Amino acid sequence: MSIKMTDLLVIGAGPAGLSASIEAARLGAKVIIADLNMKPGGQLFKQIHKFFGSSAHHSGTRGIDIGRMLLEEAKSAGVQIWLKSTVIGIFPGGKVSIEREMDDGTTELVTLMPKELVIATGASENAIRFKNWTAPGVMGAGAAQTMINVNHVKPGNKVVMLGSGNVGLIVSYQLMQAGCDVCALVEAAPKVGGYAVHAAKIRRAGVPILLRHTIIEAKTDSNGTVSGCVTAEVDDHFNPIPGTEETIDCDVITIAAGLKPTMDLIKLAGCKLTFDGPFGGYVPIHNEKMETSVKGVFVAGDSTGVEEANTALDEGKIAGISAAEALGLISETDADEKRKEIWNRLDSLRMGPFGQRRKIEKEHLIDLYNKEVKEQKAFA
Amino acid sequence: MEKFYDIVVIGAGAIGSSVAYHLQEAGFSVALLEKKDVASGSSSHCDAVGLICDKLPGIDTKMGQASIDYFGVLAKKFKYDFEYNPKGCLYICETKPEFDAASEYCAKQNADGYPLRMVRTKELTEMEPYIAKDLYGALYTPSSGSVAVNPYKLCFAFVHEAKELGLDCYTYCNISKINTNAETNAVESIETNYGTFHTKKIVDCAGVWAPEIGKLVGIDIPIEPRKGTNLVSEQTPQLCFHKILEYGYMMSKFDSINFKRAVSPLVEEQNIAFNLEYTMAHNLLVGGNRLFRGMDTRSEIETMKAICERAMRFYPKLRDIKCIRAYSGVRPFVKDHLPIVSDVDSVPGFYIAAGHEGDGICFSPITGKFVKQIICGEPTDFDISKLDYARFEKSKAMAS
């Protein structure tokens, strides 16, 4: 079996992975970045809205443009970008196997032995279970966003959105821009979860926001696809109140119920995990270098706790610098200085009611690492 | 906390849960201690067939048949369904030399009254429409000598039925010490995170972990972990209609037979023995191999590739079916390929039922019965003197 060597393999070409590979390649590392999608950029390419935050964090720039910029930088830094390349496993001996689709449509299994590994696999959408939740027409809000903004396919005509966080609000608006009729936005909590500015846009467009409501059933037609949505009011314990059911005519139900970090490969690499509610589920504990309990395995972005593209970009940079340091391409002092600057910038991002919480959680992960990881495991 | 039991059984895999069931049924008060959860070790990282056609003619086959028959009895008796599914088995002979060797084996089994028979290419491809068309033939075992069960549910069934009879099962139980009598060295108690269990009898059914328990009473149990890997396919229409195994592996496995399969270096090095099973959940289980890797149960990419390569040789259609995951487990290997089912002379009250390697599921019903018979002082259904732990002490003595 042929095995290829490389300095650094980055798994996931989203904002975290791309920025990690750019930093490491600029410092002289031979980098391969693998992603299962047809296009790099992760979720950036569906983010046609402008970012919030400080100018150091691309405020006012659309996600899609940040994606393009990163891609150019990665290319000019000499990063090899492998698309349609699915990492199928991390195996004993530090072997990473990738099923790679070639230009002629055939697939090839390539096994790499990277000296360092960055896992930036992002997060996946949570589901909410109600009757017929698996019927065609029920989908994640992120999936609907990919359909309209990346693939230019309308998921349907009449949409009911469940969840009023920023994803639920922004995607509802973008669905309207794509020509869908958003019939209602359903939220179990007594108030809207996302930013008021996004909620105001939805309200102005005349979309009813049903607070203290949930979806209890998807109605289906004779083909088994969605033809309606049964909502109900909920009590203080989020239980549906009998007798309050109402049916909304629709052909799509989108669920914006948060994300959970994608742990499969991180687990396979043998990294020590902890459960962290505010970060969305199980996450790897790591140090200030973004290195896990396994030596040479770094993490960045949503797979270390669900946040946003800006924090992912910065964590990716730290992981890239640390990988380069492990390769001996930059001194510890220089690497520390670069990391410190980024951590300071990250602190400025992790402010406000949501941000402060994430700062606490991040520090908690690093504390846990310092307490529990006395000696790193070898990546083998 | 102090607890008192007639017998403590250690390990809730197929063997331990069967032993606990049989002892509880015999009227003893029994505690079943398990380090993790029921069926969390080898019994959930295996495939699950009981066969007579992988056993040597004579007593091995007799015991295999008795255990297979016993599955049928238990399936009727138990309220808990363990997916008992008798289905025929085909041992594929790739070449004429394999077919000839299998024919000889078949003749011996026929002489003992087992209804095995040889099939040639034409009949084989009728029985298995998706199999490669260039195979020489196969050894066919009808469902009377070949049964599939769900190995998880088998363990759950034994534990469930035993609990109905009064068994206490302690999961996530860590054993720190076994106390023995200062004069007689007889078993007295076990110290655990659940407190002290006072008992005069302990049955070590911990499989690959049995040596760890043995150490606590100062004995050396020569069981080594041997890793096996299986692949799971996506759900697919029925691809095979029998339990399928390759005969050539059986031949190359025994050193006495000077036989080499015409396989790639990868298949050889990974020690692949092709087997295939269509499960009740409509996935295929594709195996398998045996390697010594200590307690490391991570699947290896080379093994997975080699299994695929060998499997596609026999079922070319597998090329179009996706593998969704792989799992590996450790089998309790004993050098002479025989389990240890006996008492231990130097430690009165200490019994071992472990080391079944790939036969643990198949032999679990009858092993439970044997242990009950040994402890009750009854004659065992078969002469199991060669399963005695003393055989290792004898060979040690001879060596020194």
Image: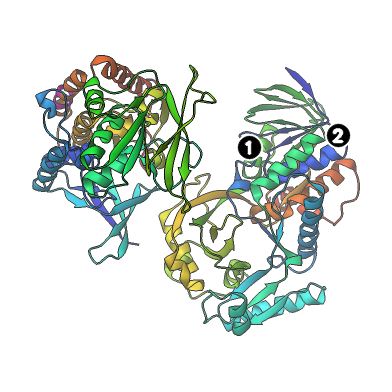
Q: Label 1 is found on which chain of the structure? A: B
Give how far across and how far down residue A332 sits, in percent.
18, 28
SS state under label 2: loop
Depicted A41 relative to depicted B163: above or below: below
What's the residue type where badge 2 is placed?
Phe
User: Disc 2 versus disc 1: distance between alpha carbons?
Assistant: 26 Å
Residue segment shown in magenta: A336-341
In the foreground, B44 or B225: B44
The residue drawn where x is 70% and y is 49% is B82
Residue A338 shown in magenta: yes
Residue under label 1? B212
Figure colour scheme: rainbow
Depicted A163 relative to depicted A124: above or below: above
Q: Label 2 is found on which chain of the structure? A: B
Side of B358 relative to A82 (left or right): right
Give how far across and how far down residue B302 sits, in percent.
42, 58
What's the residue type where badge 1 is placed?
Glu
Q: Is residue A121 visible?
A: no
Q: Residues within 10 Å of mark 2 (few under 14, many from 20)?
A: some
Chain-order first, disc 2 or disc 1:
2
Residue under label 2? B28
